[in-house]
Amino acid sequence: MSQTVAILGANLCGWMAAAALARRLPRDRYSVVVIDDGTTGDGLGDFAPVIAVPPALGGFHADLGIEPTALVRATGGSHALGVAFGGWRKDGAAAFLSYGETGAPLQGIAFHQLAGRLRKDGIHVRLADYAVSAVAAQVGRFALEAPIAHALHLLVDPYTAVLRAAAMNFGASCTNAPFADAQIDASGIVETLKLADGTDIAPLLVLDCSGSSARIASRTAPAFEDWSAWLPCDRTYTQTLPATGAPPPYTQVDAQGSGWTATWPLGGADVRLTCAASGEGTPFRAGRRVEAWRGNCIAMGAAAGLIEPLHPTALTVLLRSLAQLIQLWPAERRAPVEAKAFNRFTANAMTGARDFVIAQKAAARGSNAIGDVRSEPVLPDAIEAKRTLFAARGRLPMFDDEPFEEEDWAAMFDAMGLVPRRYDARADALPLATIQQHFADHRARIIAQVRALPPYAHAMAELAAA
Amino acid sequence: MTDALRSVTIVGGGTAGWMAAVAFGRLLGPAGTRVTLIESDDIPTVGVGEATIPPIRTFHAMLGIDEDAFLRATGGSYKLGIRFEGWTRPGESYVHPFGQIGTDIAGVPFAAQWLRARHAGLAVPLGAYSLEARAAEAGRFSRPIANGDSPLSRIGYAYHFDAGRYAAFLRTQSEAYGVVRHEGLVKRVERGPAGIAAVHLADGSRISGDLFIDCSGFRALLIEGAMEAGWIDWSEWLPCDRAVAVPSVADAVPLPLTRAIAERAGWRWRIPLQHRTGNGHVFSSRHMSEDEATAMLLAGVEGETLADPRVIRFATGHRNRFWSGNCIALGLAAGFMEPLESTSIHLVQSGLQHLLRMLPVGRPAAATVERYNRIMTAEFSRIRDFLVAHYHLNARAEPFWRDRATAAIPEGLAEKLALFHAGGRIFREADELFNETSWLAVLTGQNAPVSGYDPICDGIPIETAANRLAQIERVVATSLTHMPSHAHALARLA
């Protein structure tokens, strides 16, 4: 007989999990069943009616047969080539972090190291000028089929509906009645899930996608690691403002006191999310569940952990956790070895996502203002190591399972104004003229590529007419 | 022969025989026609399926049968559709629901808009838009409730029942209309100018008739034995030729659906009744022995069995002439197709209804007989095409299923699949039993290939269509909460 994998939370998180599992698990052996947890959130923190979907999800969508143009159209979405940061740097300069690649290495030497070599000779280099996404974003150009890495801004409800359709088309189902209660034995095994109509489900595994309330994981694995010392923002609120004209193809994030305000442009409206350390808003708590997988319950999304949505890492971490779960798929309800491996992975992934945000805020505060750190908490070691080594020689020690790549870190530090004092000595092995030529060629290619693109407004009009 | 139809003689007293008896008794009895049914307690009847489709309700209405009394007498349960399990590949299933699915969207059929939205990844599987499909799987049932445009107002349903008890129930009804049951074995058939003059029984009695209805089952005593009507063999299209059946204990909570579970070289049925569960395994004897098929059936039965498994051998096909001279064959004597879509009893009913519209005045006119035979041949052929579609569209790996996927298919089905492939269009033939909704459920359930969608859909933006679909889905979900459990509906009968 087939075994039931129960997913608690008929929301974005739950249906994404259902789609991933239904796509991968053999249908004759497992039935994937989604149970409404009775709440209306998205299971990922409920920050806004819009969610930024990073480029990493492109492959996932393709695997489910979801076509990107149809997805944007169906969800009233738009495209984002990167994030413009306003008011973050002490020098007041705007900064742009793109979703695509920045520059290209030369003879195995990283691009930002080559930039360091040029800067030593007084040549002004802005890394974002060498990222096609950043340049296209600045001039407001984009084509739907352009091979440029980009994120999507999607309305949560229709995006959930698309994933739900995909999940159900791959054989997942949803129960007729919402969740009522769970019977959990002394060792933390969820024996039975009781539904409001009296139905009982005896699950092999339960994926708790019920958001911060973590309706089952809070009982099976209550220990929670609090991150508010480093991430003091604890409330958010959203505003939807009417906007005319074509939206710009990027996200804008402006610093606001100790927090920030993100503007996600959609056709016809801007959705603004403000994240702050006090004042108005819906509260949230930054941190993570110490054991995401305990017994046969696996917390996913906000039930597993939560950080302020400065970068779209929630979906990346969710997707990678699902991939891990499928790799570690257990044969029985009790799988302590698999659980341990999974927990190590999610701890690394979530901490990595957290560290990027902490490091960005620290870099923004600390640039050109060394020493003014009296009231600040000691940064986690991993961040301190990255910051110190980057500041010294542009090096970035990387740890297991981090959601950001070395090049993302380099681009972020650079964007926040943290300039390495020296560069990789190997860059001296190349003649200065060769490096300059490499930069000029790369810039010329980018400009040619961007010139060929239509204005983003045309792309959106084409989408509407498709 | 004079103008009046003075006597109808029915040979065989299974489901078909008693269905004919009650129909003739009720409709012709008052006119003075003598209706006689000959059956022998020595000949066991083969229950031609215990699951039915909604037209049976029309038949019962015509005969003035009270639904509650009928369900009580036959241990019957309600049926909202059939769940096909593993027909595409192991683990996958879909429901072919009764009733209508969705409503037109902006003047365009639901099916077209749903296929378009599905093409764009904006639609969930078809079952979510069908109240009958949802209720069947959730174990809920209600007769239609007058409730405006709600799907609750037009719930399509049929029954499962015990065929043996059904024959007994119909016998009681028939006898009330004056039908005479004659116990005895047919020894000899006496030919006459009209075709058959009389049948001679073992006890020496001779029973004549103006019209003879052959309900003698696979033996086809009159239509083949005397009239040599000929047989059209369809084993090329539907190669299963055996079934093994066994009853088991009743489910505590019976679902209002028939299950058809694909197996290595055939499929199993599961039919929940009030007092027991019918189980069977239809298979191809070229691919599997009877012992093996029996073992697979018993392995699949949930709960204790109530009797020894019984093997039924059959040939798929039909009489070349259903009506020959003054003899009309009904039931197994007329033809047989495996009960994959619960059509056996319907074919008896359909034959009877057409016959009642064409009752001969004096000696049957050649034109009448020809028309009847043409209609019944078409009815059988279209059902055959529908059944072949289930087998043809599979992605299973076993040799039997690979053969089915690659074997030639009837022309009518090839045309249906080609039309569906080109834009998802489905056309119902005149008088075809299965309508567009049934074909849609089965073609999409079996993953029939489709390219693009009907351009008529583009009259409204896809977002609007997707919203309407979501709304239909919500209405279905809400309606479902208004339906009591199937067990509750059955308890009400007691």
Image: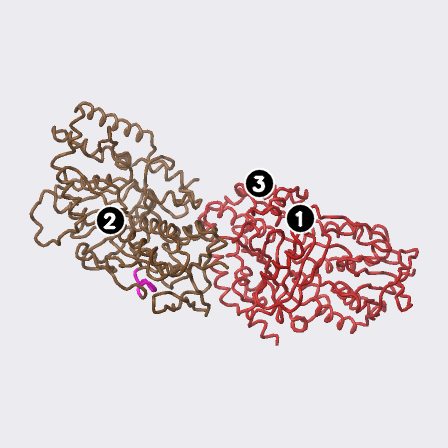
Which residue type does callout 3 highlight? Ala
Q: Nearer the viewer, residue A94 or A241?
A: A94
Magenta-drawn segment: A212-218
Q: Which residue is mark 3?
A: B422
Select label 2 or label 1 by which is in front. Answer: 2
Q: Colour of chain B?
A: red
Assign a secondary structure to mark 1. helix
Residue B54 picture location, percent across and down: 64, 61
Residue ID at (65%, 64%)? B246
Q: Chain of mark 1?
A: B
Residue B483 vertical position relative to residue B433 in the rendered view, above or below: below
The answer to whether tags 3 and 1 share a subunit is yes
Task: Give yes or no for residue A216 being in the magenta stretch.
Answer: yes
Q: Which residue is mark 1?
A: B385
On the image, which quarter does residue A180 sit in?
bottom left
User: On the rendered structure, is B12 left or right of B150?
Assistant: right
The answer to whether tags 3 and 2 share a subunit is no
Q: Nearer the viewer, residue A140 or B255?
A: B255
Q: Nearer the viewer, residue B10 or A330?
A: A330
Work out whether residue A38 can be spotted.
yes
Assign a secondary structure to mark 2. helix
User: On the rendered structure, is A209 left or right of B124?
Assistant: left
Q: Residues within 10 Å of mark 2 (few under 14, many from 20)?
A: many
Which residue type does callout 2 highlight? Gly
Q: Nearer the viewer, residue A200 or A280?
A: A200
Q: Colour of chain A?
A: brown
Q: Which residue is mark 2?
A: A352
